[in-house]
């Protein structure tokens, strides 16, 4: 199982330091820059203390095992793509990372804080769920929906003037200004998806977790979404993207995990080979599947 890339460069470097006894000795200097004044190690613009560290995590729904002995790390500023067949535990893992789902076996550390397994999670983590079932008459405007992304705001506790300004700024940044007062039930799939992204982003999370965000949206909206995610990642947001769309993930993610209850592959997308996919999917899976191309500007 190619898991060598499952540890962040920080972990690799710590291991090398432990072996050599000298800070940074043996580390390829073009890859890692040791900064003795800081706890972590910087690689380019990113800190490399892992933003997420999962060790030997297992999870069951009653007697049904959904995750078994899952271990990996995501570096601060990383972009992880999570793939796997239906029922392979992707959503379960995403919910655990957000603190929505309590777990009892293994350990999960997010931004240096250990989750205890209780529901709560990190305030710096935002989750865009897979499916949001809304009736077309649901009485919530785009502004109100995005406001709910601010922790202190509820339907009975409206946003402060400062929070209102944040909501307006986020709505504007996602190109939703024209829909501010519209009922969310009147929006298209792509627009609604951007509203939920705005709701997640309004609190400026350090980690953004999206579950199947491309499901049900057209090629143009997929490209727009990809650009938004690349821009956020370039600004330092750590992103975890659950997707079935391997070619979409392949161009965005810096690291891919192929999951089927356990980790079958963890590494760079370019090394994700058919054998690893076959192991996880239990069948031949083609990396080809797109009828359109995406044009992105990297690091805008
Ligand atoms: P994926 O996101 O990869 O499709 P999930 O994490 O949703 O997979 O599900 C993993 C397994 O856990 C599946 O077998 C699924 O049926 C089961 N499962 C998911 N949610 C629940 C639940 N609330 N109660 C019981 N079993 C569940």
Image (cartoon, rainbow, N blue to C red):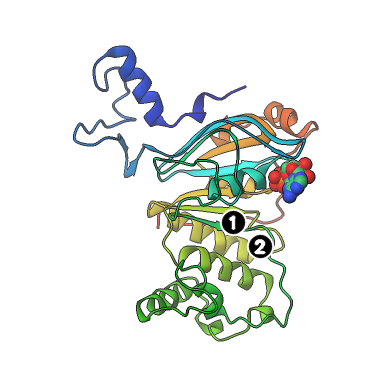
Q: Is residue 55 above or below residue 208?
A: above
Please report the residue visible at 60 percent of the width from the left and 85 percent of the height from the top.
182
State left or right for residue 243 relative to residue 202: right
Q: Residue furthest right?
A: 283
Q: Secondary structure at mark 1?
A: loop
Residue matched to label 2: 219
Badge 2 vs badge 1, beta-carbon distance below 8 Å:
yes
Taking depth in this image into account, of 122 and 11 the one nearest to the observer is 122
State left or right for residue 243 relative to residue 125: right
Q: Is residue 81 above or below residue 202?
A: above
Please report the residue visible at 80 percent of the width from the left and 32 percent of the height from the top.
283
Please report the residue visible at 76 percent of the width from the left and 37 percent of the height from the top.
285
x and y percent of residue 116 in the render?
50, 40
Q: Secondary structure at mark 2?
A: helix
Q: On the image, which quarter does residue 66 sit in?
A: top right
State left or right for residue 234 relative to residue 21: right
**Residue 47: mark in rendering:** none
Residue matched to label 1: 294
- Examine the rendering and report whether any part of residue 86 can be seen: no
Please report the residue visible at 49 percent of the width from the left and 74 percent of the height from the top.
147
Taking depth in this image into account, of 32 and 299 the one nearest to the observer is 32
x and y percent of residue 280 in the render?
72, 31
Quarter of the image for the N terminus: give it. top right
Q: On the image, which quarter does residue 136 sit in?
A: bottom right
Mark 2 or mark 1: name the one nearer the start of the chain.
2
Q: Is residue 4 above or below residue 297?
A: above
Q: Note whether ligand 1 is within 8 Å of mark 1.
A: no
Q: On the image, which quarter does residue 184 sit in?
A: bottom right
x and y percent of residue 110 in the render?
45, 43
Report crowding for label 1: few under 14, some 14 to 19, many 20 or more residues within 10 A (C-alpha): some
């Amino acid at each position: 199982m190619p898991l060598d890339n499952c540890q962040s460069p920080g972990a690799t470097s710590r291991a090398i330091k432990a072996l050599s006894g000298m800070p940074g000795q043996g580390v390829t200097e073009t890859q890692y820059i040791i900064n003795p004044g800081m706890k972590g190690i910087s690689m380019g613009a990113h800190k490399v203390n892992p933003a997420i560290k999962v060790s030997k995590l297992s999870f069951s729904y009653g007697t049904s095992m959904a995750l078994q002995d899952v271990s990996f790390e995501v570096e601060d500023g990383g972009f992880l793509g999570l793939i796997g067949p239906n029922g392979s535990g992707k959503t379960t893992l995403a919910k655990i990372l957000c603190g929505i789902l309590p777990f009892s076996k293994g350990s999960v550390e997010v931004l240096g804080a250990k989750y205890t397994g209780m529901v709560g999670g990190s305030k710096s983590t935002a989750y865009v769920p897979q499916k949001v079932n809304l009736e077309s008459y649901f009485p919530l405007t785009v502004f109100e929906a995005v406001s709910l992304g601010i922790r202190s705001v509820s339907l009975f506790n409206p946003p402060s003037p400062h929070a209102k300004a944040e909501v307006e700024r986020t709505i504007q940044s996602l190109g939703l200004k024209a829909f501010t007062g519209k009922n969310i039930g009147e929006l298209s799939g792509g627009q609604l998806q951007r509203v939920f992204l705005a709701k997640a982003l309004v609190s400026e999370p350090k980690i953004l977790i999206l579950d199947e965000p491309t499901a049900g949206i057209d090629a143009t909206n997929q490209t727009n979404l990809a650009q938004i995610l690349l821009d956020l990642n370039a600004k330092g947001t750590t992103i975890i993207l659950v997707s079935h769309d391997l070619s979409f993930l392949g161009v965005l993610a810096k690291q891919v995990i192929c999951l089927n209850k356990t980790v079958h592959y963890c590494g760079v997308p370019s090394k994700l080979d058919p054998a690893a996919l076959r192991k996880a999917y239990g069948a031949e899976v083609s990396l080809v599947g797109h009828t359109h191309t995406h044009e992105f500007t990297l690091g805008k």
